[in-house]
Amino acid sequence: MTDGLPALTWQAFTAPKAGGSRAEFEDAVAADAASGRFAVADGASESAFAATWADLLVEDYLKKPQRWVTWLPLVRQRWQELCHKTELPWYLEEKIAEGAYAAFLAVAFQNQTQWQAKAIGDCCLFHVRDNRVLRAFPLERSQDFGSRPTLLCSRFHAEHQPAKCLRLRSDWREHDCLIMATDALALWFLLQVEAGKMPWTTCLRLENQQQFVDWLKQMRDAKKIRNDDTTLLVINSADMEGQEP
Amino acid sequence: MPYEAELTRANPTCLLFLIDQSSSMAEPFGGQADKPKAQGVADGINRLLQNLILKCAKSDGIRDYFHVGVIGYGGRVVWALSGPLSGHKLVPISLVANNPLRVEDRTRKVSDGAGGLLDQRFKFPIWFESTANGRTPMCKALADAAQAITEFIGKFPKCFPPLVINISDGKATDGNPEMASYALRNLASADGNVLTFNAHLSASAGRPIEFPAMESELPDAEARVLFRMSSILPPKLCDAAKSEGYQVTAQSRGFVFNADLVSVLRFLDIGTRAAQTLR
């Protein structure tokens, strides 16, 4: 653990869309409690090489702490290099020219008591304290979810309005919890909160990937969570371990 | 609710275009003397196929969410994809993607973000070429379409209902097409009846009538026949048309009368939108 950061633990769960395979999974998640950096991304299904883009975003975010404006061109360059390994048919050349799109959400702890988040798109963060949601970010209500969220493109298009990166700074106390999720699960979470329920208790109770997959299948079958690639990342104070949520 | 089936590779839908190739299609659109109707339609179909392919393209190849086909009707009624797919009927979109007749290098203007324009090169594949001769055997084209769609529904009984788009500039010369169109629209998957949309191309510069809801909005018997041959827009498509600024109601039909080139291209875009919401 880096000096000056809180002791953290985390658990990440992922599941591809029902009917899709692991190879087609286009969410990505990366976490490092020691550096206090965490990220999730959701590659857009209409893009090609969206999984490559989502993976690069989260992994590179953890590796290279630097300013957004410096970091983004480098990670875009890397995406192009990875895509152009072989000669490609006309449609993949066109898709690479269009670029891949992804929603991106990252959290970085600054010190024992402060963290900040960056978000583009509809991956969501929920800050839970004292058994209530202190803050939902960047979307705050279930009706904020649309079918066309602003996404981060792997190409710079001069003709496009650049996607706006939203930022949040907040404090951290012992026993706080951060829940990061891609859109299908985040929408369920907000709907539950709006119905007066406590969805974080479910997230905190999950102990392993199999439990997550089984629970998600139930929710999908009951049409409570949309069938989509799904990722959940739960960050806790290290001394939360073993406690009942 | 009908028209809700999810598009998957195991449960694809189909898009079938019926293109008038009679001799009058060599004439220009009304008000656009430089563009023969046949050429404008061929460009529109090629661009639409390209867009569909790009929606289905992933890094590991093309996902077959669609089967597509083109029937041309003029001197003959033929399955009209060219090149390696010549004579093929409904084909998976991956086969279309990998078998164009040729791929042209074209240039388009894009904004440079600083008030200027840049030339951007892009690939433009061709599958369907324009031709114009003979009469207008629309009834035979509709019957051939019904046969192919019947086979498709047999294979994919739960599919999002097949969509047939008929583009013509004139009257059928081989009978009344209403019966053949009715038979086609009567075919159904578990998710609803086949959708048949019609675009009537104009040689005059009059105002297009887009997505009409009542026969009384139309000027003549020919237009009313095509209106009756056109399906009511399913709700999602109605919403798509509304979001593009069209005045539509729950009774609006997939029909444009007296279309110029811009109107027919917008019609193709909206008409195929319901089948394009991939997740």
Image (spheres, coloured by chain):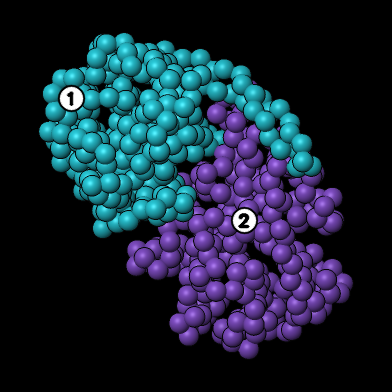
Chain colours: A purple, B cyan
Image spot of residue B66 (x, y percent): 37, 35
Depicted A152 relative to depicted B49: above or below: below
Where's the C terminus of chain A, which quadrant?
bottom right
* Residue sitting farthest toward the right: A3
Q: Residue at label 1?
A: B139
Depicted B237 relative to depicted B139: above or below: below
Secondary structure under badge 1? helix
* Tag nearer the camera, 2 or 1: 1
Image spot of residue A132 (x, y percent): 59, 85
Where's the N terminus of chain A, which quadrant?
bottom right
Q: Tell me, for residue A55, which label it has, or none.
A: none
Q: Tell me, for residue A150, which label it has, or none.
A: 2
Q: What is the C-alpha distance between the residues marked 2 and 1?
A: 46 Å
Q: Residue at x 36, y 53 (%)?
A: B248
Q: In this view, does A33 lie to the left or right of A22?
A: right
Depicted A156 relative to depicted A188: above or below: above
The answer to whether residue B173 is seen in the rendering is yes
Image spot of residue B215 (x, y percent): 22, 45
**Hey, what amino acid is under mark 2?**
Thr
* Dot 2 alpha-carbon crowd within 10 angstroms: few under 14, some 14 to 19, many 20 or more: some
Q: Residue at x 36, y 65 (%)?
A: A223
**Hey, what amino acid is under mark 1?**
Cys
Q: Which residue is drawn at 77% across and 49% down?
A: A72
Numbered disc total: 2
Secondary structure under badge 2? loop
Would you identify the image quadrant in which residue A164 lies? bottom right
Near-viewer residue (A125 or A149): A149
The answer to whether residue A39 is seen in the rendering is no
Near-viewer residue (B48 or B279): B48
Near-viewer residue (A226 or B225): B225
Q: Is residue B8 left or right of residue A112?
A: left
Give the letter of the chain under mark 2: A
